[in-house]
Structures are given as structure tokens and as C-alpha cells.
Amino acid sequence: MTQGPEAGARKVQRRDEVKARLGEALITVALDRPYSAITVEHIASAAGISRSTFYFYYRDKGELLVDAAREVVERMFSQSDEYLHGSGDPRIALREALARNVATFAEHTALLRVTMEV
């Protein structure tokens, strides 16, 4: 039996939710220990899932880290888009883009710290 569009949408939503929980769990675990001491078991436990479920989504903790960091970097580039491609006063656009990027950096300091550690 084939899945309808609703079932496919629920599956995508579930995947996105689990991946978001795993990213948050990585950050939570990273607050207490260096990246080298973090295990998949630590991350899975903090996310409330099994290790085998973790491996359904990611090959290892490095792939999770890259995925989580990619989202933050993409958001920062998106926040700079008006300055890079917009019209109007470039000084104002730059100031606003930098303010948004600083806020995003502050919000994701733990993730970016772990990324730099690796």
C-alpha cells in the first residue's frame, strides 16, 4: 500500500523533529564535557531516543555536528542577504545584518564553540 501525501508529510515532520532534538541534545551534552568525551549514547539519551534511532538519522556524532552547524551558518548567510544583495543605505543594511548575526551567534554559542573545538 502506498502512502498518501499526509503520511509523507508526517514522516518528514517527524524526521525534522528528531533531528532538531538531536541537535539540541548535542548542545546540552556539550555544555558539560568536551566534544572528544561526548558519545552517541550521551546524545541519544539526552534526546530521549535509542542509539539505534540515532544511527537511523546520522552515521556518527560528527555528521550531526556538521548538520547542526550548517543550519546556523545558512541562517547567518540568509540574515546577511539584504546587505549583500539589497538596495538602500549599505551602512544601515550592514549594521542590521551584523546585529542579526551577532544575535544568532550568541544564541548558538555552545554549538559554535564545539565546532571550533573540532
Image (cartoon, rainbow, N blue to C red):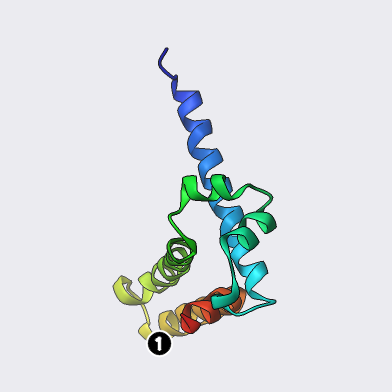
- Name, please, the residue furthest toward the left: 85
Q: Is residue 102 above or below residue 60?
A: below
Residue 3 found in image quarter? top left
The residue lying toward the viewer, choosing from 29 and 86, is: 29
Residue type for callout 1: Arg
Q: Is residue 35 above or below residue 11?
A: below
Q: Is residue 8 above or below residue 77?
A: above
- Name, please, the residue furthest toward the bottom: 91
Q: Position of residue 98 (x, y in %)?
A: 47, 82
Q: Position of residue 75 (x, y in %)?
A: 45, 66
Q: Secondary structure at mark 1?
A: helix
Q: Position of residue 63 (x, y in %)?
A: 43, 62
Tell me what residue is drawn at x 50 percent, y 24 percent: 6
Which image quadrant: the N terminus?
top left
Q: Is residue 84 above or below residue 53?
A: below
Asked whether, in this view, residue 23 is left or right of residue 2, the answer is right
What residue does disc 1 label? 91
Tell me what residue is drawn at x 62 percent, y 47 percent: 50
